[in-house]
Image (spheres, grey):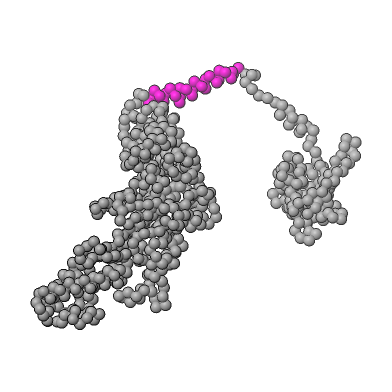
Amino acid sequence: MKLLLARLAKNKQGQVARTDEVIEAESILIGRGTDCKLHLPDPRVGLHHATIQKTGADRFTIDAPNSAMMIDARAERASLLRPGQQIQLGPYRLGILPPPDGIDVALTIELSEPLADRTIAMALAQKRTRGGLAATWLSKRALSWLFAALVGVGFLAWPVYHSLKQDHYRHALVVPLKKSITPDGAWDPGPLDSGHASFGRNCAACHQTPFVQVRNDACESCHKAVGWHFPHDTDSAKKLHAAVFSADGGEGRCAACHRDHKGVNALKRQDSPLCTDCHLDLKTRHPAVGIPNVTDFKTDHPPFKLSMLVAGKTGNDAVIRVSQLDKVNLVAKSNLKFPHDVHLAATPSGGLRSPNGMRAMECKNCHVPDETGTRFKPITMKEHCQACHSLEFEPKASQRQVPHGRVEDVIAMVNEFYAEAALLGKPIDQPDQPTQDRMRAGTRQAGGPVKSIAWVRQKADSVVTEMMEKRTCFICHEISRDATAAGTTWKIAPIAMTRHWLPKSRFPHNQHATFDCKKCHDAGKSKSSADVLIPDLANCQSCHSGSDIEKDKAPGTCESCHGFHVGGSRAGKPVILPKPNGGGVKTFKHSAALADK
């Protein structure tokens, strides 16, 4: 829209001077504000008094929804602009003219009601008026000293005297919250956190030494079980801790992060600067740590580093850490044969064949959340596999199953079973064995005990060999013959099923239960148990932003996944490692000294 504006002004002789200008804009704002295209600098005009805009072909309107406007001596809020109209906006008169070629709207503007000279004179006189103490008997210096003395007595001397004299406030364990305000309460900078509300006005519970910041031992006297940022389990970890944290000052002081008197829920921080203030330049400040700099989850978070169990190892040697970018070493060497795609396949007949008919399997059949909802319960043969993968070895004669454990126990049970059959003359019907290997009901082996023993050994060895090398155990386990043994025996490769891939992070599965497992774990395409199905960084970033709010994404601060204190509820769950000689389990101490491994 092009608007031709003709400004009219009269000089002292009453002669009219005209100046023209062209204004181009989609809409033209008229008012006292400096952002108005048609600026009218008069206090009787609104900041945004009216607007001229195009509403159709050769159709232009003026609107003043919140201000006074007279159009042809009638009060109007809006009107279609037509040549010949006279519009009064405060002290200004606008005249609508026929627009020349190339111009959409033409108008004149004139200040028709100037401010009275007396009003201007009064405003200037008021501006020049100055007040002060010089015309009175009061003195600035005397008042300054008086108020300084009052502040010193009321907020320093009296509180100090009261604090030193009232010892019961210093030693009482709990002081009722409704007790009257004490003089030293003037120093209270704000309400306590809800966890410290029981202290009442017993300031000395934390502030043990006057005019000294709260010391760590004051916090640790109550919070005895709170761990530091990483374990002090090695000399290098202790040295690093001494370099990073000081005992009672600087960044090592508890109160440096946990600041009380900031509200009822402000003591526990969860903002990203809690971590990034140190980690944004960690390589320069503490290069021995080996951890990259991090400032935000969305922009520069390093790729995930998975903690994977190593089969056959014990203690801290049983875990290695592998970056998800390391495609060569990112292999789960569990020594198990488990194709996810086979177990999750949806066949036309309705799933997998099982002893109870066709069965359609889902992730939740094996991955059952633990009591906390954060991790999953261990997968066991008895609970999750044996219903379909039976360990029966003579199903037509007995429902007895071999134990799921050591090879020696399997061999012993099979030998005992066939020895009992030979001794008691039990019928053994196994069509896939030669006729001479079978025993008929109610008969005994000709040739006496010697031939019976030979039959038992031959039969047991044949059955165990088939289980170890053709079916049953061979289906799921990596098995090899033990050449060092005196008789025929086998070695089953040790199992290493990693349960805690990210021990230093917190991922609550229960909070993601509304999502399909396939969104993060593409198990339906996995043909080998060696595939690592942990989602990568990009997968998490598709739903979680960094510190900044993004549309359709949940904000992700450091505290969303990590905790500061070792052993804390948000610090993840340590890896459970086997102890040497089968002595139970131990936890993997993921200290900063091991961060670069």
Q: Position of residue 465 (x, y in %)?
A: 25, 71
Q: Is residue 130 magenta?
A: no
In the image, what residue occupies the spot 43% across and 33% down?
250
Considering every residue shown, the one lying at the far left of the view is: 448
Q: Position of residue 380 (x, y in %)?
A: 29, 63
- Does the image show residue 386? no
Vertical relation: 428 (above or below) 244: below
Q: Position of residue 12 (x, y in %)?
A: 88, 35
How many numbered marks does the figure carry?
Answer: 0
Looking at the rendering, the stretch of residues picked out in magenta corresponds to 137-163
In the image, what residue occupies the spot 42% across and 65% down?
526
Say which of 409 and 368 sits in front.
409
When asked about the image quadrant of residue 462, the answer is bottom left
- Drawn side of residue 537 relative to residue 54, left or right: left
- Drawn side of residue 186 relative to residue 318, left or right: right
Say which of 546 and 89 sits in front.
546
Quadrant assignment for the N terminus? bottom right
Say which of 534 and 460 sits in front.
460
When asked about the image quadrant of residue 410, the answer is bottom left
Q: Is residue 151 magenta?
A: yes
Q: Position of residue 220 (x, y in %)?
A: 34, 37
- Does the image show residue 552? yes
In the image, what residue occupies the spot 25% across and 63% down?
483
The secondary structure that most of the magenta stretch takes on is helix
In the image, what residue occupies the spot 13% across and 75% down?
452
Vertical relation: 78 (above or below) 213: below
When asked about the image quadrant of residue 199, the answer is top left
